[in-house]
Every structure is written in C-alpha cells, then in structure tokens.
C-alpha cells in the first residue's frame, strides 16, 4: 500500500486552526507531506467545527494490552484463546499488542481488570483517548514525542504491529499513540458526534451500529468498525476484518493510582 | 496552588511535597489469585499514567475511515 496523504503548507499546519490546512503542490516552497489527509479536487479541507470539551481526570494504560496479558486473562476466565491459529509466530509474540478481538472482548478485559483491582476500569472514551494522545489536548496532529512523525525513529515503518513501547512515548508518557495497533473506543460511532457532544465528559452516542476506533498515525483521524465483526481468513484476501485493532484501558478515578 | 510552585515559594523540599500534595488511590492485589494473574494486575496498575483533566478543543479529520483492510501475510 502506498502512502496516502496530501501536501499542505507548514505555515497552515503550525499557525492555522487545528486540522485546517492549505493544500499545495509538492513543489511549493512551504510544502510538507501530511499523511492520511485527503483532499477532493479544488477543496480547501477543514476539520471545523472545533468543539470545546472538558474532561475529568483519569488514568490510562501506558501501553496497548499485549498478547501476553490477554492470554493470562483468557486462561483465567476460561475464554477462548485470542486469534488462535490466525496469526504466525512473528505476529503473535507476547509483547506485541493483542489484536483481532471484537469490541466486546476488549471491553471485557478492561472490566475484568477492574473487578480484580477494585478500580473503575473500562475502554477509553474517544475524547479521553484524543486528549491523552495530544498530551492533554495540545495542538499536535501526531501523538509522538515531538508532535511530528519520523518513520523508524518515533513511529513504525509501515503496516503491521510491533512490540509495544518500541518507540519513545508522547510527552505524557503514553506509548504507541500514533502507531502500532489501532484501538477500540468505548463510544458508539457517529460522524458528527464530536461536534454536538455534551461539553463535559462525553461518552459517545446512546446507540449506533459501529464503534469508534482511534490511533492512526495522525491522532485526529477517526475510524469506525462494527463491534461484533469477527476477523476471518478468506482464500482470496488472507485476513479480513479489523486485523490491527487492539486496545488499552483507562481508570475512571480522579486520583493517581498506586500499588499498596 | 500547584505543589511544585508552593515548594518554590516556601522553600519546602520537593520530595516532601510530592506525597503530601496529592491524594492517591491505593490498590491491593489479592495474593490468593494465580501468580500470573497477579503479575498482569500489578503491571496494569504500575503502567497507568495519570491524566489530569481539563478543557481542550476536540476536532477531527474528515472523512472518517473504516479500518477494514485485506491483506496476505499478516
């Protein structure tokens, strides 16, 4: 798969409204490559409207949940082994992010952690995830250490998953917020929800048919997937479904958590 | 007032300030659980990053995308 994106001016990236860019030809003296940004012919693309959101404090997993941890969970609870027989040894290494699970399987893991620690744990809401990826809502498009991407230095070289924590964390200390597996969110997906949500601690629409998924290279990009769509193998295409969707958990408590 | 600022103004040692300034939720891991479960629970708690709440501007890039891809050799 080739790179997808567009050339924008670095001035519009650095000084313009968040997510609103001036598109230019690649030979423009101020051109910079912006992956995963799309532009229809003649369109000046914008991410408006900007919507103010206020979040309560919470804690978030530093890493995406690994196969190693998820396998302990399935064994302890008698659930089926995740993606058994669907991945080669290189893809299913213990320290790689667990993926190929449904939304419910991901959420059940977080609830299991919560039951066994006495903490109010769950999947992150989309707002919580974005706020954390942008290091408490800073004006950055990438959840990397610098706010910009550099392949092989602070993001992976391409498709596929790598061991969690292979690259430096974002300034908040969270790893893989702009790379590695994508992540299931708690929220139902609605394309315009972010613009109309409640201002305080939004948790997504009441209902829907798809769940939100985040963690593309560009942290502002939103994805969505049917929650029950189990990945499958087809003869024609190999793996189908949502092969690279994993997750991490949050604790909805307004104080830091420590071990006794 | 933030603890670090208070420490500067009052010459209070920062180390002493750290524990006094912020309440924390303590978690005890049940030692009757299998060892490997205790390890997962312990690491999950140790690897939490506290995110202090606040206000921010929520935006998105359009169009939204489906994750679905098909490929060989995953």
Image (cartoon, helix red, strand yellow):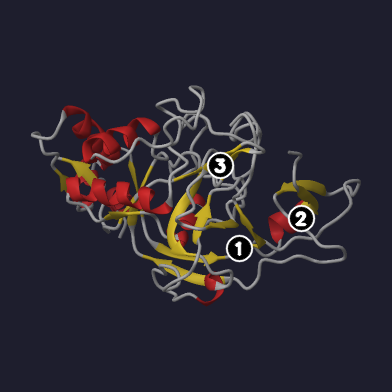
Q: CA distance from mark 3 to mark 2?
A: 20 Å
Picture coordinates of residue A249, whole percent (x, y): 36, 48
Q: Residue at x 13, y 35 (%)?
A: B33
Q: Residue at x 32, y 56 (%)?
A: B2
Residue furthest to the front: A235
The disc placed on residue B60 is: 1
Q: Nearer the viewer, mark 1 or mark 2?
A: 1
Q: Tell if the residue under mark 3 belongs to the same chain as the one under mark 1.
A: no
Residue furthest to the right: A27
**Does residue A159 appear in the picture of this structure?**
yes
Picture coordinates of residue B21, whole percent (x, y): 22, 52
Nearer to me, A170 or B3:
A170
Q: Crowdedness of circle 2 by 10 Å Cα count: few (<14), some, many (20+)?
A: few
The disc placed on residue A11 is: 2
- On screen, residue A103 versus residue B66, left or right, reads left
Nearer to me, A185 or A141:
A185
Residue at numbered disc 3: A144
Q: Crowdedness of circle 1 by 10 Å Cα count: few (<14), some, many (20+)?
A: many
Q: Is residue A223 above or below residue A171?
A: below
Q: Crowdedness of circle 3 by 10 Å Cα count: few (<14), some, many (20+)?
A: many
Q: Residue at x 18, y 45 (%)?
A: A116
In the picture, residue A199 is in which quadrant?
bottom left
């Amino acid at each position: 798969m080739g790179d997808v994106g567009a050339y924008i001016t670095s001035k519009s990236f650095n000084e313009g409204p968040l997510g609103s860019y001036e598109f230019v030809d690649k030979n423009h003296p101020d051109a910079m490559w912006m992956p995963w940004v799309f532009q229809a012919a003649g369109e000046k693309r914008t991410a408006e409207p900007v919507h103010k959101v206020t979040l309560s404090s919470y804690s978030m997993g530093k890493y995406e949940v690994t196969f190693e941890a998820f396998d302990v969970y399935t064994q302890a609870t008698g659930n089926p082994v995740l993606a058994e027989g669907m991945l080669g040894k290189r893809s299913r290494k213990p320290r790689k992010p667990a993926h190929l699970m449904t939304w419910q399987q991901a959420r059940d893991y977080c609830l299991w952690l919560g039951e066994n620690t006495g903490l109010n744990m769950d999947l992150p809401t989309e707002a919580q995830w974005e706020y954390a990826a942008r290091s408490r809502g800073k004006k950055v498009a990438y959840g990397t250490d610098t706010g910009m991407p550099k392949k092989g230095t602070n993001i992976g070289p391409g498709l596929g998953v790598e061991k969690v924590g292979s690259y430096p964390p974002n300034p908040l200390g969270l790893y893989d917020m702009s790379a590695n597996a994508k992540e299931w969110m708690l929220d139902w997906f609605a394309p315009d929800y972010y613009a109309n949500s409640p201002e305080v601690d939004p948790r997504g629409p009441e209902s829907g048919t798809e769940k939100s998924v985040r963690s593309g290279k560009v942290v502002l990009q939103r994805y969505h997937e049917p929650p029950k769509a189990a990945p499958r193998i087809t003869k024609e295409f190999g793996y189908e479904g949502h092969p690279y969707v994993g997750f991490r958990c949050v604790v909805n408590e307004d104080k830091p958590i420590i071990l006794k | 007032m933030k603890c670090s600022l208070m420490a500067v103004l009052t010459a209070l040692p920062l180390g002493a300030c750290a524990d006094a300034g912020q309440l924390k939720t303590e978690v005890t891991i049940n030692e009757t659980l299998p060892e490997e479960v205790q390890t997962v629970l312990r690491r999950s708690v140790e690897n939490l990053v506290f995110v202090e709440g606040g206000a921010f501007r929520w935006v998105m890039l359009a169009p939204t995308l489906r994750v679905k891809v098909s490929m060989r050799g995953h």
